[in-house]
Amino acid sequence: MEVILAVSRWCPSCPAAEQVWRKLSHKEGFAFRTLDVGTPEGRRLSLEVGLKSVPTTLIDGRIVHVGVPTPAEARSLLQGERP
């Protein structure tokens, strides 16, 4: 399982979302990375999946959440549930 958090340097909410996912990835042991939508790779991903806002969480290439998840919401998303 891979969690990608689409972020931007100008986004005031992105650091909080990153903190939730980074902390959970250390506890749960899944692959996690951030991807800045301002980079070529980030722009490519944005077009492929139709990103409209940041922070956006993708799990295994699919958009599962927009905004800053609570830790409980993030855990539910990992289990395939929609909070």
Image (spheres, rainbow, N blue to C red):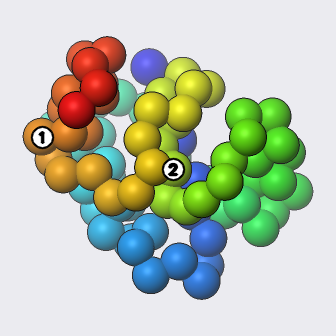
Q: Residues within 10 Å of mark 2 (few under 14, many from 20)?
A: many
Of the image marks 1 and 2, the number of the one nearer the N terminus: 2
> Vertically, is 24 above or below 64?
below
* Rendering quarter of residue 20: bottom left
What residue do we see at 29% from left, 26% from top?
Answer: 82
Looking at the figure, which quarter contains the C terminus?
top left
**SS of the residue under disc 1:** helix
Decide if residue 3 is in sight here: no
At label 1, which amino acid type do we have? Ala
State whether residue 74 is above or below residue 8: above
Task: Locate residue 51 relative to residue 10 in the image: left or right.
Answer: right
Report the disc number at residue 13: none
Query: Which label is found at residue 72?
Result: 1
Q: Residue drawn at (57%, 26%), measured in percent from left and top?
A: 62
Direction from residue 81 to residue 60 in the image, left or right: right
Residue name at image x 40 percent, y 57 percent: 67
- Whether residue 75 sits left or right of residue 4 in the image: it is left
The kind of residue on which mark 2 rests is: Thr
In the image, 64 versus 33, the foreground residue is 64
Q: Nearer the viewer, residue 16 or 24?
A: 16
Q: Position of residue 37 (x, y in %)?
A: 72, 60
The x, y position of residue 77, in whole percent, is 29, 28
Give the Cα separation between the discs numbered 1 and 2: 17 Å
Residue 35 in the image: above or below residue 39: above
Question: Label 1: how many residues lie within 10 Å, few (<14), some (14-19) or many (20+)?
Answer: few
